[in-house]
Amino acid sequence: MARNKATTQPFNIMIVGQAGRLQYEALLFMASLRAFSPNFQGRVIVAEPQAGPLWSKDPTISPEIRTALTDLGAEIVPFTNTHFGEKYPYGNKIEGLAALPAGEPFVFFDTDTLITGDIESIPFDFDRPAASMKREGTWPEEELYWPGYTAIWKSLYDKFGLEFESTLDLTQPDEYWQRYMYFNAGWFFGADPAAFGARFLEYALAVRDDRPDELVLQSLDPWLDQVVLPLVIHSFGGGRPAPELAGLDGDITCHYRLLPLFYARESDAAIAAMEAVAAPNKVKKWLKQYDAYKRMVYQGRGQKVRAMFDRADMPPRERQIRNKIKSAGFWVR
């Protein structure tokens, strides 16, 4: 889909990079950004957790991937985990915001994201933060004696003195999960990473360490970041993404997550973009070191998974997709 170049203020991009799968995802992210947004003028900051007491192994990026990332123009900036770490690695996206320059607009992406178009064509309104709606109703979970969606979500807004009613989507039925503001934390943006990160951390720790009574039956692992993110966004005057942001999780970005799921359900254009970006030897020689990329992208297993599904008639739940792939022996992480 063609887009006109949007007039938007400069911004920085943040991803998290560390040893293991994320460093390879970061490399593919950077390669896709340079391929499909070659004129992006902002800084791309790879926030890197440092070795310390909250990690049993050194989480820093390997020297060869570090060089490959910087050759593509990424800046690797260290940060120290003081509250999260190995036990809750999703906390890196919270604590890692401290690695960004204060006062400069930012867009965060999970590393398992592919850039497939001109990121600067998205007309971000950084004074109205938003986050990804590419999610399922994973939280809260319905329990036999639970108080219900409204009571759970309202208890969280009340805990931080936030108004609740305006966050409801009144086109959705009462006590249906989509009525309540809930995001995937795969992307989000704001005007100031220092302020956003400080509040994200404050709220996350407060919920983790002193949850409202209404949450007593609910798991916060791995959902803590996604539980708190709507509260943070609402507190800064933001909300659900406006229609002009449709290129995110659309024709500009693809949050592919795990490669078997990517091949099963994403568009032909996204698949073609992935395989084109992964093909040059300067990328391929590193990605094929990681088993999932080796098998799914370079050995063709992804196309076998793709042939198992009809994109126009996909199973309604992700778990069903996973189980079908696993039963065929094609699952990798």
Image (cartoon, rainbow, N blue to C red):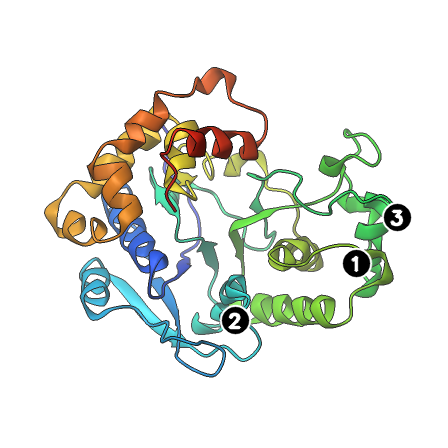
In the rendered structure, the answer to whether residue 200 lies left or right of residue 212 reads left
Q: Position of residue 37 (x, y in %)?
A: 29, 44
Q: In which quarter of the image is residue 162?
A: bottom right
Q: Where is residue 18 in the image (x, y as percent from the top left)?
A: 36, 66
Asked if marks 2 and 3 touch (Cβ < 8 Å), the reply is no
Seen at 46% across and 55% down, the residue is: 107
| Mark positioned earlier in the residue sequence (2 or 3) | 2
Q: In which quarter of the image is residue 258?
A: top left
| Residue marked by disc 2 | 95
Foreground disc of the pair 2, 3: 3
Q: How far apart are marks 3 and 1 (CA)?
A: 13 Å
* Position of 92 relative to 27 (above/below): below
Identify residue type, mark 1.
Leu
Q: Position of residue 80 (x, y in %)?
A: 46, 79
User: Which element is circle 2 on?
Assistant: helix
Q: Identify the mark at residue 147; answer none if there is no mark.
A: 3
Q: Quadrant of the N terminus?
A: top left
Q: Do we see residue 192 in this rendering?
A: no
Q: Identify the mark at residue 156; answer none if there is no mark.
A: 1
Q: How far apart are marks 2 and 3 (CA)?
A: 32 Å
User: Which element is circle 3 on?
Assistant: loop
| Mark positioned earlier in the residue sequence (3 or 1) | 3
Q: Residue furthest left?
A: 281
Identify residue type, mark 2.
Glu
Foreground disc of the pair 3, 1: 3
Asked if marks 3 and 1 touch (Cβ < 8 Å), the reply is no
Identify residue type, mark 3.
Pro
Q: Do we see residue 139 in this rendering?
A: yes
* Position of 116 relative to 82 (above/below): above
In the rendered structure, the answer to whether residue 132 lies left or right of residue 3 reads right
